[in-house]
Amino acid sequence: MELVIVESPSKAKTIGKYLGKGYIVKASKGHVVDLPKSGLAIDVENNFKPEYVITNPKSLSEIKKSMKDADKLILAVDLDREGEAIGWHLAKELKLIDEKGNPKGKKKIERIVFHEITKDAIQDAIKNPRNIDLNLVNAQQGRRLLDRLVGYKLSPLLWKKISFGLSAGRVQSVALRLVVEKEEERNKFKSEEYWTIDAGLNQKNSNKKVSINYIESAAKEDSAEKKNKSVIDSIKFNLAKIDGKNPKIPNKKDSEEVVNFVKDKKWIITKIEKTESKRNPKAPFITSTLQQAGVNSLGFSAKRTMSAAQKLYEAGLITYMRTDSTVMSNLAIDQARAFIKKEYGNEYVPVKPNVYQSSNKSAQEAHECIRPTDFSKLASHLKLDGDQERVYTLIRARALSSQMTPARLLNTTIHIELGKYLFTANGKIVQFPGYLRASKEKSEDTILPEVKQGEELFAEVINSIQHFTEPPARYSEATLIKKMEELGIGRPSTYASIISTILARKYVEAEGRYLKPTDMGNVVNKLLVNYFSNVVDYGFTAEMENNLDRIAEGKMDWVKMLKDFYFPFEKEIELQDKKIDRSEFKQLGTSDEKCPKCGNPMVIKLSRYGKFLSCSKFPECDGMKSLDSEGGTEALTLDEEKYEKGPVTEDGREFILKNSRYGKFWAHPDYPKVKEAKSLILKEKCPLCKHGLVERKGKWGKTFIGCSDYPKCKYIKNVKESKTEEETSEQNVN
C-alpha cells in the first residue's frame, strides 16, 4: 500500500479516482507544522533556527495512522515552494527524512509534481518521482522567517508610536505605500478647464436648423451623446486639429468662436483613409493577469478569483493556477488547435503554434500557463457554481484564443476640413474575426456608413462640451497587481493575500472599485517612509524577492540572506525607537471647535477607532468630541424607544454615550481614566430569564441579539435583513 499526500480533501478525492487500488490518498489540509501564532519563535543567534509547532494535530495524526500500513509515502503536494515546504515538514514529522532532506528509516519516500489533475498527468507523475527539493524549501522558509522578523520587530514600534494593535508587513507595507503615494499625487493635482467640439452629421439634408448645444459640465457629457443618438443615421465627427495641431480650447468663449465659424459651413468630405491592421491574440493567463481580468471583466476581487480557480484546479478542470509562465504544453497546444479547426475552421488555426514570452524575467518556464485540462469541455457541460463557471469560461476563452489567428481590421478615418479646423470620424470594420471568435472580448468598434470623397454631409447638431482634467486614477485591485508585478514586488501567489491584508487591517478601503488609504493607513505609511525607508523601498523589496529566487535556484544561502538583512535592521529599530516622537503621528490637524470643558481650541487626533477632537491643552484638559465620517462633530443621541436609559455611577453621575468602530456604548464619566464601559440595553426583554437584551457582533461580523446575562443565559436571536422586512429566528442554546 502506498500513501499519497495532497493539501485539500477535494484534491484528494479527484486524485483518488485516477490512482485506484493500492493507494490511500490523504489531505494535510495545508501546513501541519508552522511558526506559532504568537512570539518571534526564531533563534536569531543560532543561524535563525525556527521554533516550529504542530498547527494541525488532527490531520497529522490521521496521516501517521495511515502511514503505519503503508510501504511508501508519495508527496503530491502543490508544485510551488509552499507545497515543497508542506511535504518537507510532513516527511520530517513522519521521521522519513532528516533536516537536510536525506531519507532515513526503511520506508520509501517520493515527491511527484504535476501541472494538472488529470489521469494521464497523475500516472505520468507517479512514473517519474523525484526527491524533495531542499532549495525550494529553503526559499519558502526564508520568506516565512523574513516576514516574521519584519512583522514582529516593526509592529510593536507601531503600537508604541501610533496605536496598539497595528501591524506592519514586509510586502504589504510597500503595497500600502503605492496606494498612499497615488492619493498624494491626486491631492496635488490641479484641474484645468478645456472644451471639446463634436458634430452629428447626416448624409440626408433634413433642412432643419442646426442645433447648437453648450454643455457646461463634463458630468453632463452623456446628454451630448443622447442628442447625437437622437439624430437618425448621424455620423459623429470630432474636432481633431486646429492649424494642424491638437486643439486647445481653454474656455467657452474660444469654443463659441469655433462653433460660430463652422455652423453655417458646407461639410464636404475632403479625404477618406482606409488602412488594414492586425490585432493579435493575448497570451494565456498567468496568476497576475487572471487576477486582473477577474477584477476588470467579472468585478471579482483577486481573492475571490483565486478561490474559484483553486476549486477548479482541485476538481481537475484547469492547470495549476499559481504560475508566472505563459508556456503551454505541446499536448495542450495540439488539443487546442484540433478543437479550433473543428469548431471554427482551418483558417482560424495559425501555420505554427503561437508562442508567448513572459514579461517576468524570473518566470519559471518549466511551469505552464493557466488553461483548461480539456478544451472540449464548456462551462455549460460542467456542474459549477456561479463564480467557478465564470472564471472557467474566462480561462478557457483566453487559452483557446491564444492559439488562434489574428483578427484583421479595416480602420477608416473620414476627414472634413473647414478652414483651419479639421474634423474627423473614426471607425473600424472587422474583416476577419480570427481569435475574437473565441476570446469573448467586448468590441467597442464604430461601424461607419459608406461615404465618398467630395460628398456633402449635413450638420444636425453641434456640441461644445466643457471638461476638467482629471487627477490620475486610484489603483484598483487590477492596476495595483499590475504595478506590483512591474516593480517586482511580491510574487503571483501573494498578490491576493497582500491586498486582502491591507484591506483587513483598515489601512486601505474600497471606494467603488478603487483603493483609497484611510487616515490610519496614511499615518502608518508616514512612519515607515520617514524612519524605515529601506524597508518600504521598491528596489530593496524587489531585490529581496530576487534573493529568494536565488535561494530557490541553489545560488544563495538562506541563512546568509537573513543575517545580511536582520542584524542591521535590528539596530535600525533600536535607533529609530529613540528618535520617533509619538506626538508626530497622533495629531492630524487643527480645528475651529472649542473644548467643551475649558474653551481652548481643539485639535484633530487619531485613535485606532478613527479621528476625534481633543483639547489642545491635553493632558491638562481631557476634553474630547467625536467626529463623524465626514470630519464634522457628531452629536450622539439615544433612541429612547429602543434602548433603556444609561447606567449611573455609585455617586449618581450618568454614564456618557460614546462611539467606537463597534457602535455606540456607555462610558464612565471619567473615561478614559476609568476604563469602564457598558453595552446599550434594549427595552425588549429576554424570554428565558427576563434580563435585558443587547446587540452583539459575531466572529464574522454578523449582528445578533443576546441576553445581557450571558454566559448564565445563552439566549440568542439571529437578525436577518431582507428587502421587505426584518426576519428573526430564535434559538434556545441553554
Image: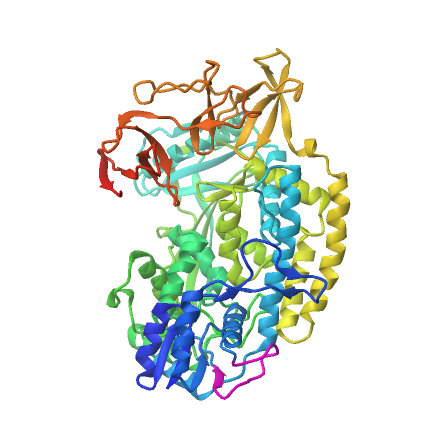
Whether residue 421 appears in magenta in the rendering, the answer is no
Q: Residue at x 69, y 31 (%)?
A: 583
To which quarter of the image does residue 126 belong? bottom left
The image shows residue 6 at horizontal and vertical percentages of 42, 73
* Near-viewer residue (685 or 487): 685
Q: Quadrant of the image for the N terminus?
A: bottom left
Q: Which residues are magenta?
A: 96-111
Q: Is residue 404 visible?
A: no
* Near-viewer residue (346 or 306): 306
Main secondary-structure element of the magenta-colored stretch: loop
The image shows residue 484 at horizontal and vertical percentages of 58, 55
**65 on left or right of 355:** left
Q: Residue at x 61, y 69 (%)?
A: 139
Extreme residue in the top direction: 599
The image shows residue 481 at horizontal and vertical percentages of 53, 54
- The answer to whether residue 431 is above or below residue 190 is below
Q: Quadrant of the image for the C terminus?
A: top left
**541 on left or right of 355:** right
Q: Residue at x 32, y 76 (%)?
A: 339
Whether residue 108 appears in magenta in the rendering, the answer is yes
**183 on left or right of 650:** right
- The answer to whether residue 393 is above or below residue 200 is below
Q: Is residue 139 visible?
A: yes
Q: Residue at x 31, y 41 (%)?
A: 204
- The answer to whether residue 275 is above or below residue 658 is below
**139 on left or right of 216:** right
Number of marks in the rendered image:
0
The image shows residue 118 at horizontal and vertical percentages of 36, 78
* Near-viewer residue (160 or 576): 160
* Near-viewer residue (164 or 576): 164
